[in-house]
Image: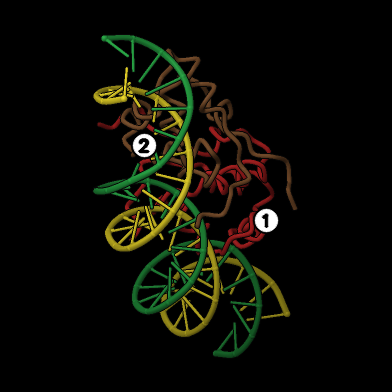
Chain colours: A brown, B red, C yellow, D green
Amino acid sequence: MGKPTKITNSIRALRFAHGEMTQAELAERIGVTRQTVIAIEHGRYSPSLEMAFQIARVFGVPLDDVFQYPATEN
Amino acid sequence: MGKPTKITNSIRALRFAHGEMTQAELAERIGVTRQTVIAIEHGRYSPSLEMAFQIARVFGVPLDDVFQYPATEN
DNA sequence: GCTCCATGTATAGAAAACTTAACATGGCAA
DNA sequence: TTGCCATGTTAAGTTTTCTATACATGGAGC
């Protein structure tokens, strides 16, 4: 359904860098479901800005360390 | 409709700092409608991550210079 | 073998973001 | 005054994001 997003992310790497945090644990920390974390991690769709900020905050890094927006795709 | 977002932004200031750019012009540059720009600027809802990246790119500043996420509201 | 546990898929539906179109207002210039 | 332009509002509809539930798989340990 969701169109695949242009935005890539480093969530999986960040989870492992933070004590092998599981998807379920990350989901609980940011207040969403596990399915949402999986979908975001796989780039099936891009998260809301609010969710993006929360994820970055969990890992204690700036937003740009979690999500990368490729230069002008058009 | 949209619930008022916790995220604040500096879009209006950035527009004026960039040659009095109008809402219509910004909208066209990021590929959305004028109404969407107005809604975002007024904080009626938060944009998608993709849109946020595009806005930051138009102004040539990092994402955190455009949007501010307040520390843990809960 | 069996049972957890982390990960993944699928589907239906709710909620939020975004569009389209119409109309209103105040300012400014001809 | 008339006309244009930037801003703003409203309402209805579409698309995307997110939830809830259910089920599948492979690895680790008993």
The chain to which mark 2 is attached is: A
Residue A3 percent location from the top left of the image: 56, 54
- The residue labelled by disc 1 is B29
Three-letter code for the amino acid on which mark 2 is drawn? Arg
Q: Amino acid at mark 1?
A: Arg
**In the figure, B26 relative to B57: above or below?**
below
Instruction: Give the residue displayed 45% in from the left and 44% down from the top.
Output: A48
Image quadrant of residue A23?
A: top left
Q: Would residue B52 appear left or right of A15 to someone viewing this image?
A: right
Q: Chain of mark 1?
A: B
Question: Which percent across, then down, holds residue C22?
Answer: 47, 85
- Between A40 and A65, which is closer to the camera in this rendering? A40
> Nearest the camera: A67 or B31?
A67
Q: Which mark is residue A34?
A: 2
Residue at the image position 61 percent from the left and 62 percent from the top: B24
Q: Where, by quadrant of the figure, is residue A20 drawn?
A: top left
x then y, percent, for residue C20? 54, 76
Taking A3 as reference, is A72 left or right?
right
Q: Residue at x 35, y 29 (%)?
A: A24
